[in-house]
Structures are given as structure tokens and as C-alpha cells.
Amino acid sequence: MNERDMDRRTFVMGSFGLGLAVLGAGVLAGCAAPAEPAAAPEAPEADAPGAEPEPTPAPASGTSGGRALVAVFSYSGTTLTVAERIAEATGADLFRIETADAYPDDYDAMIAQVQREQDEGYLPTLVGEAPDWDAYDTVYLGHPIWWGGLPHVMRAFLSQHDLAGKTTAPFSTSSSSGNAAALDALRELCPEADVREALHLTRGSLPGALDEVEPWIEGLARA
């Protein structure tokens, strides 16, 4: 079971601001959410005097004139920290993906619940949907890595939010495992998605590794 990146429920929407125009719009398919078998768990875890002020940059937009959204699921708060850095750097809005029934605070109970989701292919009920979803043409999609793969919470989110016509930039965190299986699952669920280069950070590398966020975003803009 990878990193306890799952935090209790808030919904934050930021204003859309800085000029890091990112990513071309891809023609993406809507996402189904098939179950996948569980694997062995890994434990989680100022201006110069007299100078004219610089003009304020115009709000960034996608190539189709749309907006950017950071959609993130986090349990312990680690993935949320990365999401907030991305939102700050890009001016994107921030949306917390939340389950209707909160995961237990007790770690063993939480692991047991997540294991049942994996074994039964259960998709948790989410708290509402991202507002103004159709207004976004770029989505930064963030989550922890659980059991080496994509949490079923994210499968539930993808089953309810059509990514067609949106560009997707995945980011994730874990205790030690990589993100390859989660990316494979994302591409399988959304076979026509324009999935860009992913950002993956391990808990032990934080907070220093947050400095990787801006170069990653700049790379996406050049791609």
C-alpha cells in the first residue's frame, strides 16, 4: 500500500491567473471504470525605487481559450501539497476529489477498506462533481499510488467526468513505488486521452522535490 496521501475533505477553487499557457487540447474519450485485481500492498505513507511596476500578466488559457483545473485526491495531505504548488504556478483552479464516506482515520481499518475496494472492484461514491467541468480544456490529475496502481477513487472520478477534448497532465506521490501501472490504467480507461508526461514524487523527497513542479509545467508547455 503506497503512501497515505489521502486527506479529509475540502473543496478549494482558486482564481485562474498566471501566464504559463499549457498543453494542447487532445481529443479524449469518456472513461469507463473496470475493476483490476489487487496486488500485495505497500505501507503508505519588491520593485526598485522609481521603477514602473511590471504589468500584470493576462490570465492563462488553453489553446482553445479554455481554463485549467487541478483535480486531486489526497488522504494524508502529501498529494494535496503538490496540487497546491501546481495551482499556484499555473493559476489553475483547484478541486478536491472527495468520497461521500470518509476513509477511516485508523490506518489498519483504512487499509482493509481499500483492499475490499480492490478485491470487489467497488467504486466509492464521490461528493459531487467538478463545477464548470466543460469550461476546462486542461486537467492536472493528481492522486497517491495505492497497491502500485490507480486508486479506485480515481476510477470513480474518471467514470463521472468526461475527458473528451481535454488534455491530461497526471501527477502522483507514493512511499516508494513508481507510477507506471497507474499511467497504464489511466490510458486504458481513457484510450483516446492526450496523456502528457507525468510528474511522480516520493514522500521521502518532499518538500525539496516540490522544486520539480515548475520545470515539469514548463516542459509540458514546450511539448
Image (cartoon, rainbow, N blue to C red):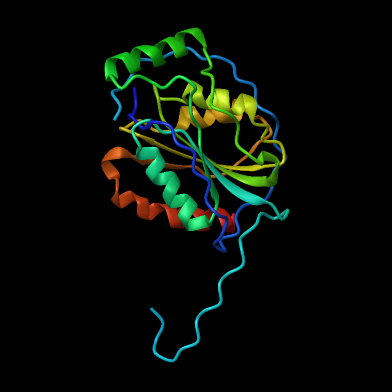
Report the residue at 41% width, 33% height from top.
74
Q: Return the x and y of residue 3 as percentages of the image width and height.
A: 33, 30
Along the viewing direction, whichever of 55 and 140 lies nearer the viewer: 55
Which residue occupies 68% across, 32% down?
162
Decide: is 101 above or below 64. Answer: above
Can you tell which quarter of the image residue 129 is in? top right
In this rendering, position of residue 92 left or right of residue 103: right
Image position of 2 (left or right of 195): left
In-front residue for pair 169/73: 73
Q: Is residue 110 left or right of residue 98?
A: left
The furthest residue to the bottom: 50
Give left or right: position of 198 versus 112: right
Total count of labels? 0
Residue 190 pos. (x, y %): 64, 29
Residue 166, image quadrant: top right
The C terminus sits in image quarter: bottom right
Relative to 45, does residue 100 appear above or below in the rendering? above
Q: Residue 68: where, in percent of width, then height?
A: 60, 49
Q: Residue furthest top?
A: 120
Q: Whole-percent x and y of residue 35?
A: 54, 14
| Quadrant of the image containing the N terminus | top left
Q: Is 6 or 15 nearer to us in this picture?
A: 15
Q: Residue at x 33, y 50 (%)?
A: 209
